[in-house]
Image: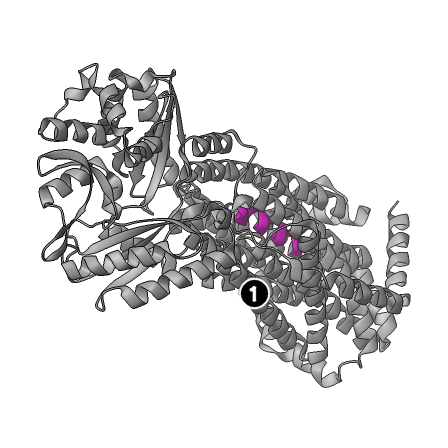
Amino acid sequence: MSDKKTSRTEYFIDLLVDRRRILVGVLVAATVVLGASVPWLQGDPTLKSAVDTRSEIYREYLRFAELFGDEEYLLAAISNKAKADDPQVLRRLELITAELGRVDHVTQVISITNFKSFMRRNGRFGVFPLVKQTAGGPTVIENYDLNRMREALPVLKLLLSPDMKTVGILIQVDKQFSFDIPVIERLLESFRTILDKDAPPTSRYVIIGPHVIRVAIQKYNVQTALVFGILCLVISTLVSAYIFKSLRVTFIAFTVVGISVVWILAFMSLSGIPLNSTTGLSFGLVLVVSAATVIRIVTHFNEMYAHEQDKTQACRQALQVVFMPCLMCSATTAVGFATIMVSSIPMVFQLGLIMSLGVMLSFGLAVILTPAFLIFFKPLPQSSYRRMADDWIAVALSRIEQMIFRHYRIVVVFGLGLTLVLFAGVFRVVSDTQLLRMLSDSTPEMKDLHFVEQHLAPVHTVEILVEAKEGAFRHYEPWGKIAELGQRLKEVPEVVETDSLLPLLTHLAGVLQEETISNPGILNKPGVIPELLGLMSFSEEGRQIIGRYLDESRGKVRISVRIANSPTVPISETINAIRSRAGEVMGAVGNVVVTGELAVFADHGERLVKSQLLSLILAFLLITTLLMVQLGSPLLGLISLIPNIPPVAAVFGIMGWMGISLDTVTVFAATVALGLAVDDTIHYLAQLQKDIRAGGSVKTTEQCVRNAFEVTAKAMLSTSAILFAGFAVLVISPFRPVVSFGILGSAAILIANLSDVILLPSVILASSNIRRLIERRMRAR
């Protein structure tokens, strides 16, 4: 069987070398054809690739939105030294409100200058504006009435700050353009032009809202893909240039990774996979992974050519050495990425699909193009080989080799101790699965959001939908439960306030009776609630307010919970606390559903974390199986896992010790690290097996371990350097989880390289049982 396998491999290698011109021609033609589809690649402005639209919680959210609307507003906040009761400030605000309302695709603009509500004025009860016209100009109603209105309608807290120095303007955009990024960008530019022209000269303004976040995420997705891809290309190029001291070899790596990216972009475009916060990472990751195969082929080609002085024969021999190990490395890496496809979240599935296909594609391109270029180019001069043999990398590896053979027991003890310390951090890992908190605090959008939260009010909400019998909320008993729920929710640290129809009904009853807002009479007088609802229904403003909180059948009620959403408190913890209290209080009234965008994303994030922990186990089992097949022995496969435990420990340990949350991006790190870490293990053990079989009884296992180190260490260090730098550049990303992913990935690659270069030889040398097992099993093949 082994001879047949070797024969098939040799036949395939002969095909790659002898038919290289035809294969390169086919690749060039295919690349040109596929490249034509790249400009049609789409983004994901709806962010739906982050949502499992088949999930129950998403269906609940759609039902909630159908009942009460999604209420997507942009909020323009203007902060000024003068207070909002200044007639000059109000005139400017009236002008801004009117001009914003005339912008195309704007359906509604709300500010304190046009906001109306129920109140008593000059002895009359009715719907009146908050701004009164006086002889001295416009002015805001008295503070006493204004404060009562702020408690009755919490939305006013977004329109006017307590010190009256910051005002907000709510802008609603036509729904059909909510996800049209070019239209939203033009609208935002129009809004900024109006505010630049009409806002008070000393004021500062910001614009926030879901539309702004979508534009920002789309922009940052493209930026991350371009910058990460370009930097990884530069890194691969520089490392290749330094290692091989040749621009020709650098050109090979550049060409292979460049064509790989074109094919991936074409696949995404043709299959309808959008560019989002995860797929945007695929270009750089494929770049650094594909460069590794090129480096290994070129490294062994140089070694063979130094003896053969025949480029074609050197290519054959180099491929015979690296083809199967590189194929197995690509397979294990592809398996690592493919296992994340167990997730039901589209963007995660898409990343796994792109990367698993991309890794195998880059391997195919590397084994076709690299030999063709090596044979076409002139061979390197002997001076280049001498520089490669004498550079600092070679010197450093020589010293490391000496250290291993002198102190291998100390290395094993240190490696074991470091792994245990890292694993101890696992118990400190916390989960925070909120996708909406993914932007870094340094981005303009997050700074603007913090400005609004500081000067006006928190803007994050969780929605509670209570579904009772038809007409249930025409009676006072359920409203008493809503009042009780409001008190219970105050016990949750992150809850700022609850927003329901109850405060307005209480306020309305107080205004009618000229009593204070705290009068609880409506909760124990059977006829008051229907009367107040009927009274509000007489006006258009009243019907709009009722429709925001109560459906037409009066059987379903909405309660909005405004939360602080602090970065130190996992969103799932807050939502679970809200769900628990809502169920306890409102469960007797009807079915309770906690929903809203925050709840949907948090639920999906939690399920994603669980699925990816499952994918890690699956990747571990599949990769172990592949290693057993490659090495021809279950025991050798298990031994090969020894140097791959520390990288996984590094991921979870660093998360725990550094306080990096387990979220919807960092959860991939361990699986990806495992898939990449085994590559060097495969190459080292493949070379060790070759040396043991070739040495027979002449060479000792110690000599084979040393020779395997000398042959593979430089290539392992070189490829790990590219991977390490590729992950490290992610720290420049505006996405906070991506930054953490970069830190974890680079740390895992560093630990993996140290494990393969130093720990694995030391373990073999330190254990006579492992030494004998390796020798017996490898010679038996």
Q: Residues within 10 Å of mark 1 (few under 14, many from 20)?
A: some
Residue 539, quarter of picture: top left
Q: Main secondary structure of the magenta part?
A: helix
Residue 348, quarter of picture: top right
* Residue 576 rendering spot, x and y as whole percentages: 37, 31
Name the side, left or right, on which 277 lies relative to 389: left
* Residue 645 rendering spot, x and y as whole percentages: 56, 47
Q: Is residue 656 magenta?
A: no
Name the side, left or right, on which 290 lies relative to 124: right
Range covered by the magenta-colored residues:
668-679
Name the side, left or right, on which 236 lies relative to 661: right
- Along the viewing direction, whichever of 734 and 655 lies nearer the viewer: 734
* Residue 721 rendering spot, x and y as whole percentages: 58, 65
Name the side, left or right, on which 242 lies relative to 540: right
Look at the image and tell me in which quarter the N terminus lies: top right
Q: Residue at x 58, y 68 (%)?
A: 230
Q: Residue at x 76, y 73 (%)?
A: 302
* Residue 611 rendering spot, x and y as whole percentages: 55, 37
Q: Residue at x 9, y 55 (%)?
A: 135
Q: Secondary structure at mark 1?
A: helix
Does any portion of residue 11 appear in the rendered image? yes
Q: Is residue 675 magenta?
A: yes
Asked if residue 201 is positioned above or below residue 436 in the image, the reply reads below
Asked if residue 601 is positioned above or below residue 273 in the image, the reply reads above
- Along the viewing direction, whichever of 355 and 235 lies nearer the viewer: 355
Does any portion of residue 706 appear in the rendered image? no
- Along the viewing direction, whichever of 541 and 765 lies nearer the viewer: 541
Amino acid on which the number 1 mark rests in the picture: Leu
Return the residue at label 1. Answer: 226
- Along the viewing direction, whichever of 649 and 575 lies nearer the viewer: 575
Residue 225, quarter of picture: bottom right
